[in-house]
Image (cartoon, grey):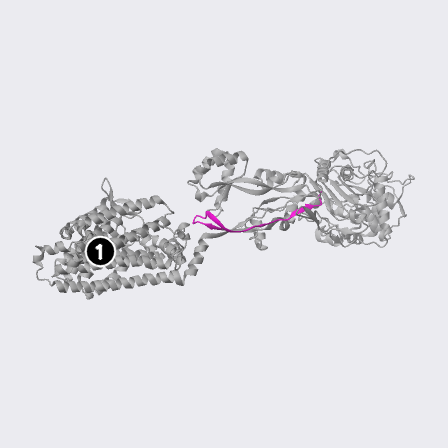
Amino acid sequence: MLRDKLKPNGPTLLNRIHIDGWLLAALMLLMAVGLITIYAAGGKDLGLIQRQTIRLGVAMLAMFVVAQVPIMLFRRVSIYFYVVGLAMLVAVLLVGTVGKGAQRWLDLGFMQFQPSEVMKLAVPMMVAWYISRFTLPPKTLHIFAGFILVIAPTLLIAKQPDLGTSLLIASSGFFALFLAGMSWKLISIIGVLGSGFAPVLWFFLMRDYQKQRVLTFLNPESDPLGSGYHIIQSKIAIGSGGIEGKGWLQGTQSQLEFLPERHTDFIFAVFSEEFGFYGVIGLLLIYAAIVARGMIIAVRAQDAYSKILAGSITLTFFVYVFVNMGMVSGILPVVGVPLPLVSYGGTSMVTLLAGFGILMSISTQKRLLLRQ
Amino acid sequence: MVFKRISIRDHTAEANLFARRTLIALLVIATMIFILLSNLYYLQIERHEVYQTRSNGNRIKVLPVAPNRGLIYDRNGVVLAENRPVYSLQVIPEETDNLDNTLEELVTLLDITEEEVADFRKEFKSTRRFKPVTLRNQLNEQEVALFSANQHKFNGVSVEARLTRHYPYADSLTHMLGYVAKINKRDLQKLTEASLEDNYAATYDIGKLGIEKYHESLLHGQVGYQEVEVNSQGRVIRTLSFTPPVPGQDLVLNIDVNLQMIAQQALDGRRGAVVVMDSRDGGILSLYSNPSYDPNLFVNGISGKDYSALLQSKDRPLINRATQGQYPPASTIKPHMALLALDEEIIKPDSTIRDYGSFQLRNSSHKWRDWRPYGHRNKDDKNIINVTDAIEQSCDVFFYDAAYKLGIDRISDKMFEFGFGDYTGIDLYEESAAIMPSRGWKRANKNLPWYPGDTVIIGIGQSYWTTTPLQLAQSVATIANKGIRRVPQIIRGNMIEGRQLVFEPKELRPVEVKNPEHWDVVLDAMYGVVNREKGTALNVFKDANYISAGKTGTAQLFQIAQDEKYDKENVADRLRDNAMYVGYAPYDNPELVIAVALENAGSGAATPVARQVMDYYFRDKPTLIAQDKESTNLAAR
């Protein structure tokens, strides 16, 4: 019966190579927007475009390869993936390479490797695997066990320190638990505990520069040439863009270099300045389409593991978008989160598209699952 | 095998639970998107104008553009102050790759001295970030070429061209013309007080002395503006709009630069001053003070060594002796004194005294000597002296007597009318009022009462009485004009599109006398000084091709004891007599008035200076006396 239902869709060419057409289209559109904006933000530097295109190509390849892997295989390796990832995080703290004031990299001899990227996928996989072993909704005990699985890597990454990534990883784990059906009572308790944890975070875990960011966020004009400069210039860029924007390559804030981190974390300000409110709506529509498609894939997935994993990846993707846009437009403190697939560079590109590879795998391998 | 363990799970219920949670998540996402969009709507639409303004404020800078300073010409159109391009080496320290390395390389490339580097570092400390600091002020063309060829190695270093003042006549005009130099903190404060700082926003130099200072407002002009787009480093990307500056006015002076140079030559390195004035309009034809110095030194920032040399020189070259030098007028004021005595009917044109070579007050043994030990004699060789003889021969006894009879109050009142003890109003800030003593003055300044003896020597222009050469020239012009007084003016007018526009002369309150014939008595006596047998200037003006009138003067700076003879040889150089001369010509139709002061030059030394200057002035005039004229051979430029 299910088989009949699926038949009208048919195994299209894309399905046969395990590609979700809608998702691919939306992602490609986003990457195009990204390249166009990087060109403007980077002072028409074709070198930047070239490097970004190569990076996107590699990431797309990763997505394509991951999409070919049967989801059952992921499920089986989830725990090993997680354990190895956790071990590497510990290793980073002990023998990691220091860069930009943080200890995030492992030197493997032939390449630098950032274990926290692995955890971006390993954590939701692990939580999804663990929770889906039991009937849903999960019991409180399992939820707590799940939380421990999330908090351990989160703290290790926060210690590096990499607030942005630890936030994303914590979110992905939480989303998995939430989608699995964690009770509202528990959610409220966690919420209360979480706010209780805030002072602990402030006094014991956050570094001075992180505290400064929060203070600056609360009142950027207190230090307009120092720590408040980024956010003030960013808001000026966005605000001066107006409804229609100043036009591509015409953004004075970015072209005349008033805006810092133009082609990386603050690229959304460049986009807003040049393409205006209309452009912003368009960009958000693309992101919304990707999220919607991801959630559809999640809902349509056949087993709990796939559902939870797909949902978690999709929601975490949105967190990226929200945190980045929120910080650039001044409603969130500055944390180093790039605008996914638009910002230049970022080790996260491969992880991000690998995540979409998993979504595609889930989306296109239903029948294989059914045949089992 | 995994499925076996959870075989009891209710797939539909789980799917429904998941779907519900998904729905909630989507709702939360929708809310968050709404929050993002609301904020962006607020920034981009509600507050758009605010941010648009701030964005423009970031990128648009208004740069002031300095106006070109007006040129200064002499009365014949000769340029006395011009603007020349100079190239200066400027460094924006924040834009260099490494300031120390850059400086080191520049030092080797352009032979920059340690002093220049030290000055640079000092200035760098007090300069705002991303503002250029000058490393070397004047680059010659070779250095400009050398740097340009190597410019690519020096980020943040550039050669800037600007116009700077140049005075082609160097030390010939310094005290009168003055100079411009870099605006300093005090200038800036004054400009701010006058609300002129915006107009000087781009101006580098300001008038510091002389005409350059006095007529600063005419010469400077109006600042222009350039609206430019800059990037975050402040580098100019393009010009958006341009309001051109209004250049300063080109000024024409009454000065004749050739006459000025003749005056300089005539002084021949001796300390002193020459003032030449046109009696018809008060115009200053020449105003020279010696020793002088090169004003161009100051324009480009004088070195500490040079400046202290000027400052500490015993000859005090920084003083404008023509307007600030306070000299006892000595016998040069005898014509004035005679006029006063005639007008107050102390003497009559034909009243006489007997001159025994000294003057004594009743009940006093003190003798005031005449400069001639045995007194003067009239043309009949008798010691009977009238006012004309007294002026011609410069008889002291006659004027001791006249002054004593006039009393200090009448003298100081009338002399004040001539302008003594007051500013002449010349267009120079460097002017002294000198001293016209009075009872009140002595009480206030010396805390002593006025003694009758004080009045006696006032009669020969000594004691406390001091005048500037300019005051003397102005007062002689007043006598030559029979009372009409004018403000001495250096500025003649301005040059508009190659045509001179002459300003109106400024008249002052005239000196009035009860009987105008007294003017003629005095003027005739001054004629006698130069042209009659016993005149003190007869020898010097022999064979002149014009008829002049004048008065000599010798000021004693060294007080000799009673009954002692003044011995020139025994008196130290700096205590030797000052020589003075005042005169005008032509006698019957005055146009030129001259006053000369020569410090420690000894009696009579000033007269030939006046002759030399007047000869030049009248060089082309038809010979008035049929006599062999000596050619001066001074070609006009």
Q: Do we see residue A163 in this rendering?
A: no
Within-10-Å neighbours for mark 1: few <14, some 14–19, many 20+: many
Q: Quadrant of residue B526?
A: top right
Q: Which residue is mark 1?
A: A313
Q: Is residue A83 magenta?
A: no
Taking the spot 53% from the left edge, 33% from the top edge, the residue there is B142
Q: Would residue B426 be found to the left or right of residue A30 on screen?
A: right
What secondary structure predominates along the stretch shown in magenta?
strand
User: The disc labelled 1 sits on which kind of residue?
Assistant: Ile
Q: Nearer the viewer, residue B88 or B362?
A: B88
The location of residue B126, given as percent across then percent down, is 49, 46
Where A233 sits versus A106, above or below? below
Where B295 sits versus A333, above or below? above
Q: Would residue B201 be found to the left or right of residue B288 on screen?
A: left
| Dot 1: chain letter | A
The location of residue B406, given as percent across then percent down, is 83, 52
> Tag 1, which secondary structure?
helix
Q: Nearer the viewer, residue B182 or B48?
A: B48
Q: Would residue B226 be found to the left or right of residue A87 on screen?
A: right
Q: Which residues are magenta?
A: B228-255
Q: Nearer the viewer, residue B474 or A270?
A: A270
The location of residue B404, given as percent across then percent down, is 82, 50
Q: Is residue B233 magenta?
A: yes
Q: Do we see residue B541 in this rendering?
A: yes
Query: For the view shown, which residue lies furthest in the right direction?
Result: B380
The location of residue B563, given as percent across then percent down, is 81, 39
